[in-house]
Amino acid sequence: MDKFAEKYVNSFMSELIARNPGEKEFHQAVGEVVNSVAPYIVQNPQLMDLKIMERMVEPERIIIFRVPWMDDNGRIQINRGYRVQMNSAIGPYKGGIRFHSSVNLSILKFLAFEQTFKNSLTTLPMGGGKGGSDFSPRGKSDAEVMRFCQSFMTELQRHIGQDTDIPAGDIGVGGREVGFLYGQYKRLRNEFTGTLTGKGMSWGGSRLRPEATGYGACYFAQEMLATRGKSFEGQTVVISGAGNVAQFAAKKAMSLGAKVVTLSDSNGYIYDPEGFNEEKWEYIAHLKNVLRGRIKEYVNEYPTAKYFPDERPWGVPCDIAMPCATQNELEAEDAKKLVANGCYCVCEGANMPTTPEAIEIIRGNGLLYSPGKASNAGGVATSGLEMSQNSMRLHWTAEEVDKNLHTIMKDIHESCARYGTEEDGTINYVKGANLAGFIKVADAMCGQGLV
Ligand code: NDP
Ligand code: 2IT
């Protein structure tokens, strides 16, 4: 980076940090993007004059609200609800809702910021947004989750709509929660529209939306592997998380010939040296999605596997690592272990799971590395396909959706290559994804005047 660009980054970041004190995840996400796009910005001074980057880091609107609900013991509980409407330059706000005890404004702003670039990369017309609550569905009854979702939506419904803002799932929000949220939305607004995605198949959902993030991540990884003449066939894959993204990343990787040996949750990881197979996968899906159990229960059913409490799976030797749980779950020490064990590809299924220090180690050692905004974009892309189907009042077959998803992931890889190929011929996926995502949104903002 030249001196001028470096100066731009430093002054931009110190202003951002001063204006948004304490929001460390937001600073981290912005820092990564600004570092990638600064050389482009300083070469295009109109972007500086129009303060495009300064506008991009200021959410168009943030809604924060009280969510009161009653638990099964008749006690009153209060949570905090949020929706960050980050950027609508290229389409209505679009992005998931996260229910997790760690949710705060910094986390939702980082997610909404990332979402803006990710959605731009999908080639579909979607702006960026993210919402959620510090409510955790873990350990709550279905009735409690329903009452919470109804209270949350009673306020949120004023601010969303099929042409305004279209929420979906994220951590802690899956098919059950989207159902409760949609039911309340429909009841209050008296309209059957595609305002949420990730809906059930009998009420407007898209085939393959549940699978899309994990499948898409594997399609993206296939493209990365192909640049080195490799494929999933015969490779050992380590995956973190045991939720929606992790499950379907594992399923697709297995079907492409890989041996997937780990999954995890916030309490620890399981290692099955024989690798999962279809039957074991079905057991895990039932355990997590129906029984809402913990991943350690796997070893009771399959005693050849081992459970490692309070540990992450990154010390297990592998060829390919796919972090699919949460932000900053792969740190410098973990990255060193991956490198030492001969891992050559890190493909992110989660949002910002790898710390900046870990990314430096991974990239510095020549591993293939894709940021989540590129490799996990298949989920929101398929949400975009769900929106199209809802607008047309049609349903596509799984084959049609899969074909579209596959094409989109290949196109995202191509964009990364176009904007991120370095002089030595290697692809810098961070730079490529950030620049490709940025240019489209920046062009739209330039064209729409000072708003
Ligand atoms: P789920 O709620 O289905 O699963 C989350 C998984 O991650 C669980 O196994 C959970 O374990 C684990 N996890 C959550 N928080 C932590 C933590 N602090 N430390 C360790 N493990 C944790 O969520 P998803 O699978 O939908 O989301 C996973 C990631 O993928 C997130 O980063 C999300 O933003 C991202 N993503 C999701 C998309 C989607 O379509 N769903 C699309 C694109 C990205 P536990 O049960 O212990 O909490
Ligand atoms: O982070 C993400 O891209 C998601 N949680 C999916 C968002 C969506 O609107 O499908």
Image (spheres, helix red, strand yellow):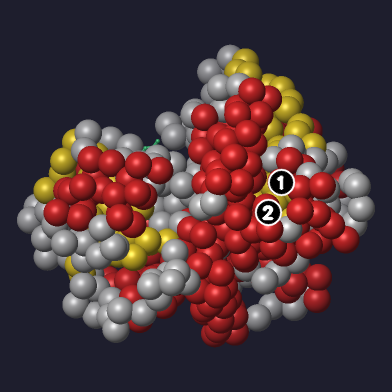
Question: Residue 227, image x and y in percent?
Answer: 36, 79
Residue 53 bears which disc, if any?
1
In the image, residue 75 above or below residue 325: above
Spot occupied by residue 137 in the image (x, y as percentages of width and height): 50, 35
Which label is found at residue 395? none
In the rendered structure, are the residues bearing label 1 and label 2 in contact, judged by CB atoms less than 8 Å apart? yes
With respect to residue 54, does 262 lie above or below?
A: below
- Bin the neighbour count of mark 1 within 10 Å (Cα to Cα): few under 14, some 14-19, many 20 and up: some
| Residue 295 in sight here | no
Q: Nearer the viewer, residue 444 or 386?
A: 444
Question: What's the amino acid at mark 1?
Answer: Met
Q: Which percent across, then down, holds residue 207?
A: 58, 72
- Residue matched to label 2: 41
Locate residue 394 relative to residue 325 in the image: left or right. Answer: right
Task: Report the residue at 56% width, 22% height from top.
Answer: 22
Q: Residue at x 75, y 34 (%)?
A: 62
Q: Is residue 40 left or right of residue 99?
A: right
Disc 2 on helix, strand or loop?
helix
Q: Which amino acid, by three-letter code, is at mark 2?
A: Ile
Q: CA distance from mark 1 to mark 2?
A: 9 Å
The kind of secondary structure element at disc 1 is helix
In this view, the residue in front, 2 or 261, is 2
Numbered label tally: 2
Write the residue at 38% across / 46% down: 354
Q: Residue at x 75, y 72 (%)?
A: 388
Pinpoint residue 78: horizontal percent, then vertical percent.
Answer: 63, 19
In the image, taking residue 418 as reference, residue 163 lies left or right, namely right
Q: Earlier in the sequence, mark 1 or mark 2?
A: 2
Q: Quadrant of residue 119?
A: bottom right
Label 2 crowd (10 A; few <14 / some 14-19 / many >=20):
some
